[in-house]
Amino acid sequence: MDLSIIIITYNSRQHITPLLNSIKKSPDRLKKEIIVVDNASRDDSADLASKHPLKPKVIRSKINQGFSKAVNQAIKASSGQHLLLLNPDTRLVGNCLTYLHDFASKTSPLGAVSPRLLGLNGRPQPSVFRFPTIINAIRHYFFNCQNCFGKYLPPNKTTKVDVAVMAAMLIPRSTIDTVGVLDERFFLYYEDIEFCRRLKKHRLPLYYLPQAKVKHAHGASGHFRSHLDSPLLKSAQIYHGRVYSTLLNLTLLLGQKWQKFIRHPLPKLG
């Protein structure tokens, strides 16, 4: 098996069929399997996947176990030499699978490779970032380092990056054998950062391959009413530790206030 495509669904009925249709239309000649893990959706996401002509293997979880656990469950059930993680709100464009697989097969050492994400309107989405450290936050907010903190759009050429979002990421099975599966402490968010940190620790580079393209309905997989409802804060504390996370948040707050001040300085008196 050349490729195992892993999709985690949660109330994804609007997106799962278009994604599977895009896989079906892919002109690649790869031997591939599709594994869908449904995290106890309240809609018919799993049924739609099961009835699709591609006949993916659908694993129905009785609870919403989170992204990392669901991915690891799919990895255990997979047999491909390469694993492609795809959010349900993505759609393959053209020869994406061929580009990703060919690059991974010819590149060594390799930790993972991510395609260029596009909005549904075709515009490129920022999808990579540097490791979220206090130093990088200071460089970004106080020393005008544009891509030091937060997502950014790399040049339109193959580039090594620190972190790429896992909305679409191809990972060789040999990488999993070396660095391990996703960290199940993370329900959602920061699992990509933690995984990429392990890639760096093992000197396995992560590449951004803009030749391969995936459309992405950004934010459609979250289903949170507000930032406070999401697991982002808890995940950040797990990754950084409570003290570092607090100091980083303070740095970000001061940096944002500083940026606001230099854009709108106080009026001169007199």
Image: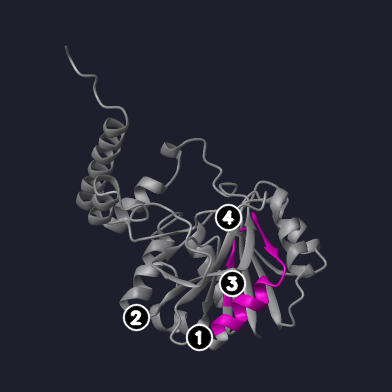
Left or right of 65, for residue 37:
right
Q: Does residue 2 sit above or below 51 in this rendering?
A: below
Relative placement, left or right, of 214 versus 75 is right
The residue pinned by badge 3 equals 84
Q: Give the amino acid at mark 4.
A: Pro
Which x, y percent locates residue 133? 27, 56
Circle 2 is placed at which residue position?
203
Residue linked to disc 4 = 124
x, y (%) of residue 126?
A: 50, 54
Query: Percent from the top left, x then y, of residue 88?
Result: 64, 57
Q: Name the residue rendered at 63%, 62% in the picture.
A: 214
Q: Secondary structure at mark 2?
A: loop
Magenta span contains residue 38: no
In space, the residues marked 4 and 1 are separated at their CA atoms by 25 Å
- Tell me the residue at 34%/74% (across/down): 200
Which amino acid type is marked by label 1? Thr
Residue that label 1 marks: 107
Furthest toward the left, the residue is: 270
Of label 3 and label 1, which has the lower sequence position? 3
Q: What is the C-alpha distance between the residues marked 3 and 2?
A: 21 Å
Disc 4 from disc 3: Cα separation:
20 Å
Q: Secondary structure at mark 1?
A: loop
Q: Are marks 4 and 3 in contact (CB under 8 Å)?
A: no
